[in-house]
Amino acid sequence: MPETDAFEKISNAYYHLTSAEKKVADYVIIHQRGTQYMSISELAESCGVAEATVSRFARRLGYKGFNAFKLAVANATAGRSSGNPLSGEIAPEDSVADMCQKLYAANVDAMEQTLNLVRPEALRAAGDLITGAEKVLCMGQGGSMVIAQEAAHLFSTAFGNCFPVCDSHTQTMLTAQLGERDVILYFSYSGATRDMLEIARLARERRTKIILVTRFPKSPGAALADVILQCGTNESPIQMGSVAARIAMIFVLDMLFSEVCRRDLDACQTRRRQVADALAEKHL
């Protein structure tokens, strides 16, 4: 027997919900496609309820938590419309040229959204932290860790104090040894993973600064960060790890790297030249 979709569950449970939970149900039913792109904080704010109410609503419907509920909404919405798990709304009947054009448009839109969301004062503040840091540890989880590795690689072409930390246990171990002059550059699209929150709480105990690159500036992780750099593009749960979302994060990274380098461009160019000379020996 097929599983009851999210909207049927809401309909079946509606008259057993509390008044606050009904606000969530009403909003989700009216904004079916939009809900799948929202964080728990955004949905709670839009409904005028507490985040705990949204979590309780999801569990009352039989889901383990908000993310499981959001995935169910995305699956139900995709089943009722032309939505699919591919970025750019790619359709099977599209030509290769049409597919490429749609992906190009989606990626350009991700950068345009990011450009409109990133605040200059936040970029300057993040640049101040990195410029004055003894160590910068670049972290993330899953696909975001790939971007964190790219960040460490990019900064290492001009600075010698940036390191990627991939394993979650190692992230915890190293964070526990950081100090006030160290910085964590964390990449998390949702800003709401358990590992990210554990690192952020530990960093605050150590008085270590956190720069968070995320889509959701009102996420639980953002509440613990010192500087928030917001990236653009919406990503549904069935589009996890979309290229457009990664491009948005890389665009933020490129802006941050440029902000740090331009503060002492001559020194930056000298160090990059030294790195280039050293790497030249590794090429045929």
Image (tube, rainbow, N blue to C red):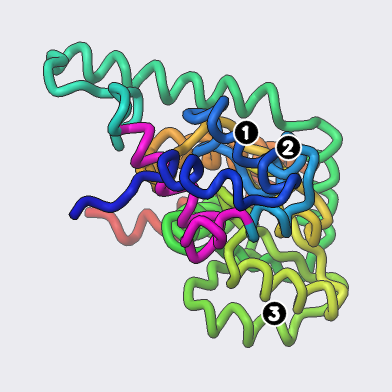
Quadrant location of residue 211? Answer: bottom right
Q: Nearer the viewer, residue 157 or 207?
A: 207
Q: Position of residue 153 (x, y in %)?
A: 50, 57
Whole-number angstrom distance, CA of label 3 to CA of label 2: 36 Å
Quarter of the figure with the C terminus: bottom left
The magenta stretch is 57-78
Whether 263 is drawn above or below 177: the answer is above
Q: Nearer the viewer, mark 1 or mark 2?
A: 1
The amino acid on which the numbered mark 2 sits, given as a three-letter code, is Cys
Q: Earlier in the sequence, mark 1 or mark 2?
A: 1
The amino acid on which the numbered mark 3 sits, given as a three-letter code, is Thr
Q: Earlier in the sequence, mark 3 or mark 2?
A: 2
- Dot 1 alpha-carbon crowd within 10 angstroms: few under 14, some 14 to 19, many 20 or more: some
3 and 2 marks in contact (CB < 8 Å):
no
Q: Earlier in the sequence, mark 1 or mark 3?
A: 1
Q: Which residue does the numbered mark 1 point to in the structure image?
A: 26
In the rendered image, residue 63 lying in the magenta stretch gets the answer yes
In the rendered image, residue 1 lying in the magenta stretch gets the answer no
Q: Which residue does the numbered mark 3 point to in the structure image?
A: 175
Whole-number angstrom distance, CA of label 1 to CA of label 3: 42 Å
Whether 176 is drawn above or below 222: the answer is below
Q: Nearer the viewer, mark 1 or mark 3?
A: 1
Does any portion of residue 183 appear in the rendered image?
A: yes
Using residue 4 as the reference point, say whether residue 228 is left or right of it: right
Q: Find numbered disc 2 in the image and state the secondary structure of the residue it sits on.
A: helix
- Dot 3 alpha-carbon crowd within 10 angstroms: few under 14, some 14 to 19, many 20 or more: many
Q: Which mark is residue 47?
A: 2
Quadrant location of residue 225? Answer: bottom right
1 and 2 marks in contact (CB < 8 Å):
yes
Using residue 251 as the reference point, say whether residue 240 is left or right of it: left
The amino acid on which the numbered mark 1 sits, given as a three-letter code, is Asp
